[in-house]
Amino acid sequence: MNLVMVVHGPEAFDAGDVGRLIGLLSPRQVLVAGVMARTAAEESGLPVTCTDERPSVVLAALAGRSCLVNRGKTPESGRIFGEIVAGRLRGLVHVETSSRTVYCWDHADRALAEEIAQLTGYALVPGMSTGDRREGVREVRGCIPGEAVFVNGIVIGTATDETVVLSGEGGTVRAVSGLDEKPHGLEKLLRAGLPDLGAAWCKSGPVRSAPPRQGARVSRAGRVAVIDHCGHTLYQEIGEGVCGVLAVGDDTTAVCGHICSHAGIPVFGVVDGDADAIVEPGYAPGSVVVEVTRGRDDDLGRELAAVRDLDPACWEEWVEETLRILAGRVRVVVDRRGG
């Protein structure tokens, strides 16, 4: 078939979809888009290549036959995701495993879509993406009321409707409708600069439902990476020579703990108790999570990054000294120093 499969999200790996599709379609290459998808892909052991780009960017750069593979949290959210990606391309063949559907979006390769549908037994459905975008406004569709809503990896509130409408006008980001705002989250988002909502990574719901798998412990000596409320940047920071991660923020600590559990990298997390339960936690041996008893995790995290040497001789020694510095200001809520 000479096909390149681009897989989005961890669920397609966790549900076994990717392995089955590789067996049925025999793609020449499987590319993985997304941070948590990379974690699930590495845990699966399948022959794939991981990227740091979003699916539309990966697909746009490909020549020849390609398709998007996705498993939405619901069939409708999966369809909406495919439509969004298609709106940024000139045609898209989208394999949505949650509904066993092959969508042929816009001016996609109809012959390829038919071939995939025949080989998989999935239904073939044509579709047209709307591509409608209002300047300075972003809709996050397919939400389930009560779940977290993210912009660029930061939780900015809780969905109250199936569609969240955000505005980026007036030098700030605000909810027009469908969102119970989290002021602290919006503050964190804007701290990095006003995002371009049209290009921002927006999603809702948990980032992964499966628990993490434990990997072998990395070297106990090396550099400490700092991740401050941007867990989606983790893979850019945990290259060779990293012995641990200083994670700032409840959700960031949960994401870093989950990903680093498989990578065998311990985490020192600084939280203040406002987690949004976006991923099942898990921590590599040597990890410690502290909750601030005075102030906010932001302030304490920035202080630690500024005053602590991030090139320690030993992770365990760095943790012990950091806990001594923080004595009386935090309480330990997770302690995996014993294994």
Image (cartoon, rainbow, N blue to C red):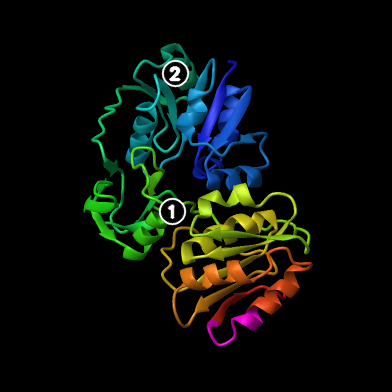
Q: Earlier in the sequence, mark 2 or mark 1?
A: 2
Front position in the image: 259 or 197:
197
Q: Quadrant of residue 99?
A: top left
- The circle drawn on residue 113 is 2
Q: Please state the extent of the stretch shown in magenta in the rendering.
A: 323-330
Q: Is 32 a magenta residue?
A: no
Q: Residues within 10 Å of mark 2 (few under 14, many from 20)?
A: many
- Residue under the point 67% across and 58% down: 214
Q: Quadrant of residue 75?
A: top left
- The circle drawn on residue 233 is none
Is 70 situated above or below 271?
Answer: above
The residue sitting at the top extreme is 111
- The circle drawn on residue 192 is 1
Amino acid on which the number 1 mark rests in the picture: Ala
Front position in the image: 17 or 183:
183
Amino acid on which the number 2 mark rests in the picture: Ala
Q: Is residue 261 left or right of residue 209?
A: right
Residue 252 location, x and y as percent? 51, 60
How far, Cα to Cα, is label 2 from label 1? 41 Å
Is 125 situated above or below 160?
Answer: above
Residue 24 location, x and y as percent? 58, 25
The residue sitting at the bottom extreme is 328
Front position in the image: 201 or 40:
201
Q: Residues within 10 Å of mark 1 (few under 14, many from 20)?
A: few
Q: Is residue 272 left or right of residue 157?
A: right
